[in-house]
Image: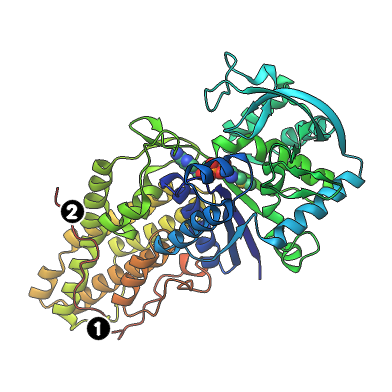
Amino acid sequence: MESYYVTTPIYYVNARPHLGHAYSTLVADSLVRMHRLLGEEAFFVTGSDEHGDKIVQAAEKNKLQVKDFVDGISSQFRELWPRLGIDGFRFSRTTDPAHEKIVQEMLQKVYDAGDIYFGEFSGHYCYGCERFYTEKELEDGCCPQHKTRPELISEKNYFFRMSKYLPWLKEYLLEHPDFIRPERYRSEALGMLEAGALEDLCISRPKSRLTWGIDLPFDSNYVCYVWFDALLTYISALGGPAGQDFARYWPGEHLVAKDILKPHAIFWPVMLKSLGLPLYRHLNVHGYWLSKDTKMSKSLGNIVEPQAMMEKYGQDAFRYYLFREMHFGSDANFSEDAMIVRINSDLANDLGNLFSRVLSMTAKYFSSIVPKPASKLEQDKNIVDLCEHAMQNYVQLMHAIRSAEALEALWELIRALNKYVDSEAPWALFKAQETERLATVMYVLLACMRKIAICLWPVMPKASVLMLSQLGQEADEQTAPVANIRNEISCFGGLEAGTKLAEKSNIFPRIQR
Ligand code: ME8
């Protein structure tokens, strides 16, 4: 059985989860579900990044011991995901002893290989980013992300010989055009390499300044820099390079937003190279969720609470909107008004209406039993072809993390099915007692609806299960509804005549404003 492994960022626990975190985690969930639908063994790793200055400062602000503070926020992340229908993940914390042990082993390995040295350093330190900036990287003397003036700090520290590997990394990016995708982010990473501002990476913090971190195995006066620690979660969650899961799942895929392109595009591949480990497969970079055209972030205080949205609009509708609205790689504006329009038009009018009319007609004409189809006419064959084509596109696009286009492809079929109901007018066939023809039309509709419900399992697991159960199919939110969706694409049918169906359906009620 093929295996698939993907990761989300390991989120900082300095504040509660918001829509941005929820989005990355939902994408990971949908990918895992998609790969399970393709018959693969798949899971993802998410977790919490708990060391460093930023966390200590947040704990102090909340008047809590650091450990109590990180335990509290970390559980908020862990507990939120299942409420959003997110399943199939391993939750990793950077304060887990097993992770800390692997970080120390990896540090020692890099040190023994001669890629870590001790040196004096003075530089511009941004507390928000928890890193030093070179003069060239600053914009008007300020951190490009936080727009604050970094502090000039001078101290002795350990350095990772990153610069030694940068020419190799540049070659690698040039030779592997889809290593970082979409393309604009590969160009951005190449731009960083070409600008010449990257130097060796400071990977330690003296304990005189910070104790909340993992001890360097070769000098207990220092703790490890948070990024060196957090990035290693991607392999410590697999038990480290010697773990069984590592052999089975590595190399994996990474999912991040563009804010953390540099550590993932530059630091991480170089760390893996120094450790002699295979590089990840792809870095998949998405844009920002904006709130009134500004990046949603905890420091700006303009965040959207995923839990509140889900309670207000329902888990499926909320997930659908996020997957449909954001084109992976670009920014998207979050707006409740736009969400209501989507729910009413795509879910209530198109999909909900199709289920509701077809199920109630089957109840009326065939006592809710799937009829046996007779031979197909041209218009039926066109629908069957469209179904195959739409599913093919959908699977391919979801696989490529292009959910907005994938859903658009599926909705073409849903809209065509609603038109097919209008043009074939089952009520007229019933009246004229054309039972064979009526049976064929209803069968074509129901069989396509089953395929649509299967396709939607990665996007709206709850609704998919509900639609499948209304179609007399066994399904649950944790197990893929079919062994391999590819087998469903080219063979029409899959719904047995004689199956008992629900009499009516109201899966997506309209939202009144
Ligand atoms: O950077 N739009 O953690 P973090 C879309 N601990 N996604 C957003 C977003 C927004 N407005 N805001 C946040 C860290 N995100 C490090 C990561 S990994 C080894 C260490 C999501 O809590 C998005 O995935 O600041 C982004 O990359 C991540 O949260 C940053 O999370």
Q: Few, some or many C-alpha atoms within 10 Å of disc 1 (few <14, some 14-19, many ≥20)? A: many
Q: Secondary structure at mark 2?
A: loop
CB at mark 1 closer than 8 A to ligand 1? Answer: no
Of the two numbered discs 2 and 1 in the rendering, the one whose residue sits closer to the viewer: 2
Residue 199 lies left or right of residue 391; in this view the side is right
The local crowd at label 2, few if under 14, some if 14 to 19, many if 20 or more residues have their Cα within 10 Å, is: few
Is any part of residue 408 visible from this angle? no
Q: Position of residue 29 (x, y in %)?
A: 50, 59
Q: Nearer the viewer, residue 33 or 276?
A: 276
Horizontally, residue 369 falls left or right of residue 184, namely left
Helix, strand or loop at mark 1: loop
Out of 323 and 373, give the one closest to the viewer: 323
> Which residue: 58% across, 60% down?
44
Q: CA distance from mark 2 to mark 1?
A: 31 Å
Instruction: Identify the image quadrant of residue 178.
Output: top right
On the image, numbered disc 1 is attached to which residue? 369
Q: Amino acid at mark 1?
A: Ile
- The residue that appears at 38% across and 41% down in the rendered structure is 303
Q: Position of residue 129 (x, y in %)?
A: 60, 33
Asked if 329 appears above or below 424 in the picture, the reply is: above
Q: Residue 111, image x and y in percent?
A: 88, 44
197 or 62: nearer the eye?
62
Position of 418 relative to 231 (above/below) = below
- What residue sits right under mark 2 in the picture? 511
Depth check: give the residue in front, 300 or 289: 300
The residue that appears at 84% across and 34% down in the rendered structure is 161
Please, what is the three-letter code of the amino acid marked with disc 2?
Answer: Ile
